[in-house]
Amino acid sequence: MNPRDAHADALGLPRTESLAVTAYQQIRRELDEFHFMPGDRFTENGMSARLGMSRTPVREALFRLQQEGYISVVPKLGWLVNAIDFSVFEQLYDVRSVLECAALDAIARQDDPEAALSGLRRIWCVPQPERLADLTQVSQLDEAFHMALVALGGNAEMARIHREITERIRVVRRLEFTRNYRITAAYDEHVQILELLQKRDTEAAKAFLRTHIAISREEVKKITLHTLQAARQGRGDGWPLS
C-alpha cells in the first residue's frame, strides 16, 4: 500500500484509485451520452470543479479515456473530444472480419472444436426466457464473444491484434447496445454462428459472420449519427468547460 492510500485509509477517506474510477465512469457516461460532443474542449480544472474532485483522480481518468480513444490532449488548451471518423472505423471493422474468419478456419481444423466452443454455447445457446436483458451486460458479452472466437483459434498474435482493434472501435461500438432490438439480434446471430461451426460448415459460418459484422457496423454508424444529432438539437448545457 502506498503512503497516500494508507493516509486515506487512516482518515476514512476514499483512495485516489477509487476516485479515479468514479471520475472515469462519470466522464465516460457523459461522453457516451454526448453531453460532450466531438470538438468540445475542456480543462482538468473545469472537469475537477464539475465532478467536485481534486485534479489527481480526474487526470488519471482522462489519461485512461485518452488511451481508449475518446479524447486527446491539446498542449496549452486542455482536452479535446475526438471526432468520429467513420471511414477509419469501417476499415477496422473490415480487418476485424478478416481476423475472425481466419480464426473460424483455425477452430475447424482442431480435433475437437465442439469442446472449444462449449463455453460460448453455455452463454448464448439458451432458451428465450434465460436471455439477459441488461444492455450493458449483453454489450460486454458480445465483445467477449468475438474476442473468444479469435482466442480459440490459437494464434496469440492474431488475438492481440484483434484485441487492439476491439479497443479502438469500442468508442463507437458502445452505442450498439443502446437499442433493445440489438440484444435479440446478438443472441440469434451468435447462436447461428455456433450452430454452423458445430455442424463443421465453416464456409457458411464465415459468410454468416461477415454479414453479422457488416450489419453491426452499419447499425453502429446509424445509431451514433442519430444519437449525435439528437444531442446537438437538445444541447444547451454551457459547454465547453474552462
Image: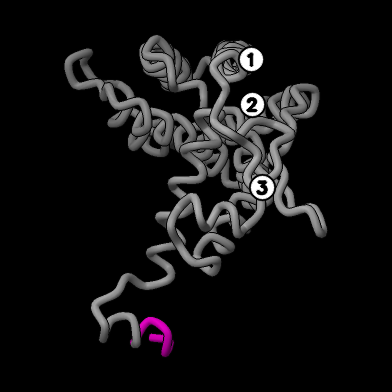
- In this view, the residue farthest toward the left is 129
| Residue positioned 33% across, 81% down in the render | 8
* In the image: residue 143, left or right of residue 162: left
Give, as a three-letter code, the residue at label 2: Cys
Percent of width and height locating residue 200: 49, 19
Q: Which residue is mark 3?
A: 42
- Provide the secondary structure element on which disc 1 rests: helix
Q: Which residue is mark 2?
A: 101
| Residue positioned 34% across, 87% down in the render | 7
Give, as a three-letter code, the residue at label 3: Phe
| Residue positioned 38% across, 64% down in the render | 18
- Provide the secondary structure element on which disc 3 rests: strand
Report, in whole angstroms, how far the alpha carbon at label 1 lies from the one at label 3. 23 Å
Percent of width and height locating residue 198: 42, 21
Q: Please give the range of residues in magenta.
A: 1-6
- Provide the secondary structure element on which disc 2 rests: helix
Q: Closer to the observer: label 1 or label 3?
A: 3
Tag 2: Cα neighbours inside 10 Å, few (<14), some, or many (≥20)? many
Percent of width and height locating residue 136: 37, 32
Q: Which residue is mark 1?
A: 225
Percent of width and height locating residue 5: 38, 81
Question: If you read the primary sequence from the N terminus, does the residue marked by circle 1 or circle 3 appear first?
Answer: 3
Report, in whole angstroms, how far the alpha carbon at label 2 lies from the one at label 1. 28 Å
Give, as a three-letter code, the residue at label 1: Leu
Tag 1: Cα neighbours inside 10 Å, few (<14), some, or many (≥20)? few
- In the rendered image, the vertical position of residue 171 relative to residue 74, given as above or below: above
Contact, mark 2 vs mark 1 (Cβ under 8 Å): no
Report, in whole angstroms, how far the alpha carbon at label 2 lies from the one at label 3. 41 Å
